[in-house]
Image (spheres, rainbow, N blue to C red):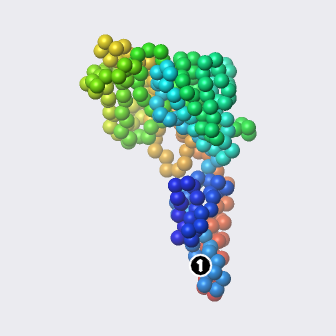
């Protein structure tokens, strides 16, 4: 039996084989042995081949206080540089900008101490011109932020909005708003939306009595996709869309090759 471990390797007879040349997603594999030839024929049922570039953010939120840190992770085969855009200029992550200090380790980009000027649209790209999804962050010098997902959330998930005061407190009475309309209150500063849907797309903010209010941020809800997607946020129109990687030829080739391997393997086993 062939299966995947968490490090994206294939384990065949307890021998680990790297998967970088194949892609990311394999559902299962079956190993057929021929007693005469002692050869293992492996059939992979491949869900999807993807060479799409994807950008992730940790922590997953779109609002930050000044002096907080943030990590960006670029997931793509050749580890492209993480770029970020402020005004009309795009800069590489491993450069510094004024007081902003950033470092890179492989595909990871860390901004150690955020400033308001670091607000903007972030993405990563490759030398070949491939570009990831966009992630927008808002860095504020104010006293209140709304912790809301920076990347699209899936329909049906439970999403919690958290209102944070720069000065820590054990009890935070907060009010939450969507497009300026009051949608709920919480004595703990949290508001949970159970089973979000596309109707929950929108601009949200929160207020803390005596503490001020947060900036507004967009919550994007995406429909579940049955196969691998590259979620892309259109920040100008504030709409989220899913687009599939250009992998149809790989899928067809994989199916044909897998079928051939099985036929040959079963033929040799039966001899």
Residue 196: image quadrant is top left
How many marks on residues? 1
Residue hosting label 1: 33
In the displayed structure image, the side of residue 149 where residue 46 appears, left or right: right
Q: Is residue 76 above or below residue 256?
A: above
**Is residue 199 visible from the viewing direction of this image?**
yes
Residue visible at 30% across and 15% down?
Answer: 209
- Residue 66 on image: x %, y %: 49, 20
Q: Residue at x 55, y 44 (%)?
A: 229
x%, y% of residue 179? 40, 20
Crowdedness near tag 1: few (<14), some (14–19) or many (≥20) residues, C-alpha within 10 Å: some
Left or right for 169, reference 78: left
Compared to 47, does 243 lie above or below? above
For the point 66% across and 30% down, which residue is it?
94
Q: Secondary structure at mark 1?
A: strand
Residue 119 in view (yes/no): no
Q: Nearer the viewer, residue 266 or 159?
A: 159
Residue sitting farthest toward the left: 187
State whether residue 14 is above or below residue 120.
below
Q: At 48% from the left edge and 18% from the top edge, which residue is drawn? A: 140
**Quadrant of the rendering where the C terminus is positioned:** bottom right
- Residue 131: x, y in percent? 65, 36
């Amino acid at each position: 039996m062939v299966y995947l471990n968490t490090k994206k390797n294939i384990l065949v007879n307890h021998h680990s084989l790297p998967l970088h040349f194949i892609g990311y997603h394999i559902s299962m594999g079956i190993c057929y042995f021929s007693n005469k030839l002692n050869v293992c024929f492996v059939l992979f049922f491949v869900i999807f081949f993807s060479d799409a570039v994807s950008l992730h953010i940790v922590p997953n939120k779109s609002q930050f206080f000044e002096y907080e840190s943030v990590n960006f992770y670029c997931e793509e085969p050749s580890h492209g540089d993480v770029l970020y855009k402020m005004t009309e200029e795009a800069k590489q992550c491993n450069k510094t900008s004024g007081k902003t200090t950033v470092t890179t380790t492989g595909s990871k980009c860390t901004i150690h101490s955020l400033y308001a000027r670091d607000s903007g649209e972030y993405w990563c790209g490759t030398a070949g011109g491939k570009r990831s999804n966009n992630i927008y962050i808002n860095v504020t010098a104010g006293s209140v932020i709304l912790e809301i997902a920076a990347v699209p959330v899936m329909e049906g998930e439970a999403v919690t909005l958290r209102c944070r005061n720069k000065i820590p407190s054990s009890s935070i009475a907060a009010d939450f708003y969507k497009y300026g309309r009051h949608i709920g209150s919480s004595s703990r500063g949290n508001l949970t939306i159970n089973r979000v849907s596309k109707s929950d797309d929108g601009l949200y903010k929160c207020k803390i009595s005596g503490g001020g209010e947060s900036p507004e941020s967009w919550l994007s809800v995406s429909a579940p996709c049955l196969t691998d997607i590259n979620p892309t946020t259109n920040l100008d129109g504030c709409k989220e869309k899913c687009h599939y990687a250009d992998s149809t030829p790989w899928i067809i080739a994989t199916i044909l090759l897998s079928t051939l391997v099985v036929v040959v393997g079963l033929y040799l086993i039966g001899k």
